[in-house]
Image (cartoon, rainbow, N blue to C red):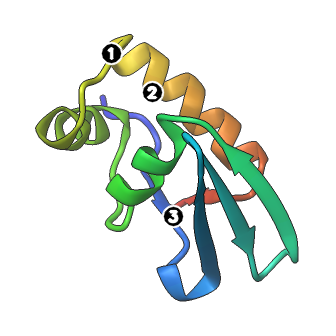
Amino acid sequence: MAGPTYIADDLQHVRLVELDGLTALFHRPSGMTHILAPPAPQILAALSEPGDAGELAVRMAEAFEVEGGEEALTARLAELEAAGLIRRT
């Protein structure tokens, strides 16, 4: 059974700025700025279309070197959801 499906906000709702290995993300709907370390920006990019942790693991493996597998991604998804940067569909 697949887990929850997530999606990130459309890029028109965020502003990203690279900062020496980190990414500053201004989230327009909340008015908050977040400082993200990898793999969070890559996860957000991979969630431009809905997906669960398994689908996301496949997408990430195609474009990035992934450590920790699906369990690590599930933990990062929970963190991004708690920060309000992704939501369940």
Please identify the residue farthest to the top as the structure is shown: 68
The residue where tag 1 is placed is: 69
Cα–Cα span, label 3 and label 2: 14 Å
**Residue 54 vs residue 22: left or right?**
left
Q: Residues within 10 Å of mark 3 (few under 14, many from 20)?
A: many
Q: Residue at x 74, y 48 (%)?
A: 35
**In the structure shown, which secondary structural element does the residue marked by tag 1 occupy?**
helix
- Picture coordinates of residue 87, whole percent (x, y): 60, 59
- Picture coordinates of residue 73, whole percent (x, y): 45, 27
Query: Which sits earlier in the primary sequence, circle 3 or circle 2?
Result: 3
Taking depth in this image into account, of 50 and 22 the one nearest to the observer is 22
Q: Are marks 3 and 2 in contact (CB under 8 Å)?
A: no
**In which quadrant is the N terminus drawn?**
top left
Q: Residue at x 27, y 32 (%)?
A: 57
The residue where tag 2 is placed is: 73
Query: Which sits earlier in the primary sequence, circle 3 or circle 1?
Result: 3
Cα–Cα span, label 3 and label 1: 20 Å
Give the vertical position of 76 relative to 20 (above or below): above
Q: Amino acid at mark 2?
A: Leu
Q: Amino acid at mark 3?
A: Ala
The residue where tag 3 is placed is: 8
Taking depth in this image into account, of 71 and 36 the one nearest to the observer is 36
- Picture coordinates of residue 10, whole percent (x, y): 49, 80
Q: Are marks 3 and 1 in contact (CB under 8 Å)?
A: no
Q: Are marks 2 and 1 in contact (CB under 8 Å)?
A: yes
Give the vertical position of 87 relative to 3 (above or below): below
Cα–Cα span, label 2 and label 1: 6 Å
**In the structure shown, which secondary structural element does the residue marked by tag 3 occupy?**
strand
Q: Residue at x 25, y 38 (%)?
A: 60
Q: Residues within 10 Å of mark 1 (few under 14, many from 20)?
A: some
**Residue 60 vs residue 84: left or right?**
left
**Residue 79 vs residue 9: left or right?**
right
